Amino acid sequence: MADINPLRLFAEDSDDLTVISAAVQDAVTKAENFRYETRQRRFSIELNRFRWEEAVGKRKSQPKSRVRSLLAFDGILSVKTRGVTKADPDMVYSLLSISFTPDAEPPGGVITLMFAGDGELALTVEAIDVTLLDSDYEWATRHVPSHERRRR
C-alpha cells in the first residue's frame, strides 16, 4: 500500500462541501451505517471510501484501495429519505455526490446526498458543518467504481 495520509476534511461553506463530495464520490455503505442522533442533531455515515487521490495517474493494472471513513453532519434539523431504506439489509448504496441548497436566509439550507439508483437523503441544516475522517483501516481493491447498476 502507498503511504498516503488519512483524510481529515472539514466543510463550513459550499466550496468546502464540493471538496468533500469529490473525496467521497463512489463510497459505498449500507443503510445500517446511517445514524441520526436527534439530541446531538448529528447525522453520520460509516462508509468505505474509494481513494481517488491515490488512483489518479495509476495504470489500470496497479491496485487501488478503499478506506473506512466517517462522514458526519452537525446542526441537523431534519432528515428525509427517498429510495433509501433499511428494509433490505444487504443493499449496498453508492454515494455519487453531495450538494447544498441554501435557504432564503443563510446560513441554513438543505444538504442533499445522491446515491446510484436514485436514492437520496435530504438533511435540513442550520449551517454547513461537515466532517470527513478516514480511519487507518484500508485495503486493496482491483475494482474501479462503476455507476452502471445497483449491487447487492
Image: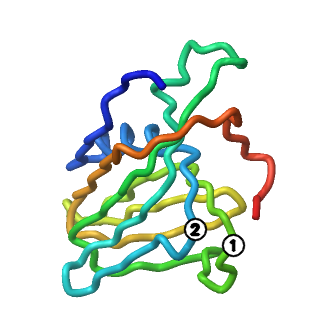
Task: Specify how the rendered protein is coloured.
Answer: rainbow
Depicted 119 relative to depicted 85: above or below? above
Q: Which mark is residue 66?
A: none
Depicted 131 relative to depicted 80: above or below? above
Image point 35% across, 43% down: which residue?
Answer: 136
Question: Residue 107: horizontal and vertical position, in percent?
Answer: 19, 60
Question: Residue 84: horizontal and vertical position, in percent?
Answer: 61, 75
Q: Is residue 91 left or right of residue 11?
A: right
User: Disc 1 versus disc 2: distance between alpha carbons?
Assistant: 7 Å
Q: Amino acid at mark 1?
A: Asp
From the image, tell me which residue sits under label 2: 30
- Outermost residue toward the right in this view: 149
- Please name whichever residue, 46 or 107, is drawn nearer the observer in this view of the structure: 46
Residue 53, quarter of the rendered image: top left
Question: Residue 12: horizontal and vertical position, in percent?
Answer: 20, 49
Mark 1–mark 2 contact, CB under 8 Å?
yes
Residue 117, quarter of the rendered image: bottom right
Image point 65% across, 74% down: which residue?
Answer: 83
Mark 2 neighbour density, 10 Å: few (under 14) some (14–19) many (20 or more): many
- Please name whichever residue, 36 or 15, is drawn nearer the observer in this view of the structure: 36
Q: Could you tell which of marks 1 and 2 lies nearer the N-terminus? A: 2
From the image, tell me which residue sits under label 1: 90
Mark 1 neighbour density, 10 Å: few (under 14) some (14–19) many (20 or more): few
- Please name whichever residue, 139 or 41, is drawn nearer the observer in this view of the structure: 139
Image point 41% across, 46% down: which residue?
Answer: 137
Image point 36% across, 79% down: which residue?
Answer: 36
Q: Secondary structure at mark 2?
A: strand
Q: Secondary structure at mark 1?
A: loop
Q: Amino acid at mark 2?
A: Lys
